Image (spheres, rainbow, N blue to C red):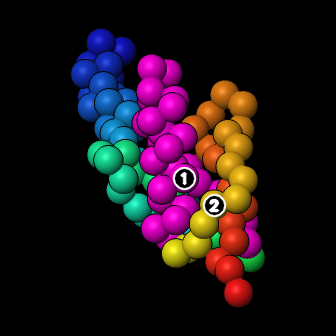
Amino acid sequence: MRRALPLALPLLLAACSGDGVVDLAGRGERIEIGGDVFDVAVEGRRAMVRNYSTGIANQARLFRNAEAAVVMATGCDVTEMTQRMGVNTYDARFDCGA
């Protein structure tokens, strides 16, 4: 049992790496804004934006950068943006004009 712990520790720590979470469906575009990395999945005139970093102390910055990531991914103006409760996932609606 004592020998198993040192062998398991590197695996446990590897699971904590920031790039470990992947959208297995292959949807979305990875965009970096101001040092924050977002996955932006666009469907119609809506986008879902995910950030897998800790956002406890930086919610306002993450919100602004998530909005900028939608603009970069779509080339359109964001008309509505909300954050899902308790996670760094945002839902956006956008308008590309005429």
Disc 2 is placed on an element classified as strand
Q: Is the N terminus in the top left, top right, bottom left or bottom right quadrant? A: top left
Where residue 49 appears, as percent x and y from the top left, is 58, 54
- Residue in the image at 68% along x and 49% along y: 81
Would you call the spot at circle 1 few (<14 residues within 10 Å), some (14-19), or many (20 or more)? many
- Residue in the image at 62% along x and 44% along y: 89
Measured along the vertical axis of the image, is residue 50 above or below residue 84?
below
Q: Do the residues labelled 1 and 2 touch (CB within 8 Å)?
A: yes
Write down the region rendered in magenta: 45-73
Would you call the spot at circle 2 few (<14 residues within 10 Å), some (14-19), or many (20 or more)? some
Of all residues, the one furthest to the bottom in this rendering is 98
- Residue in the image at 27% along x and 32% along y: 10
Measured along the vertical axis of the image, is residue 31 above or below residue 91?
below
Of residues 36 and 7, the one drawn nearer to the viewer in this rendering: 36
| Three-letter amino acid code at the position of disc 2 | Val
Where residue 66 appears, as percent x and y from the top left, is 51, 50
Residue at the spot of label 1: 67
Of residues 71 and 13, the one drawn nearer to the viewer in this rendering: 71
Residue 3 is inside the magenta segment: no
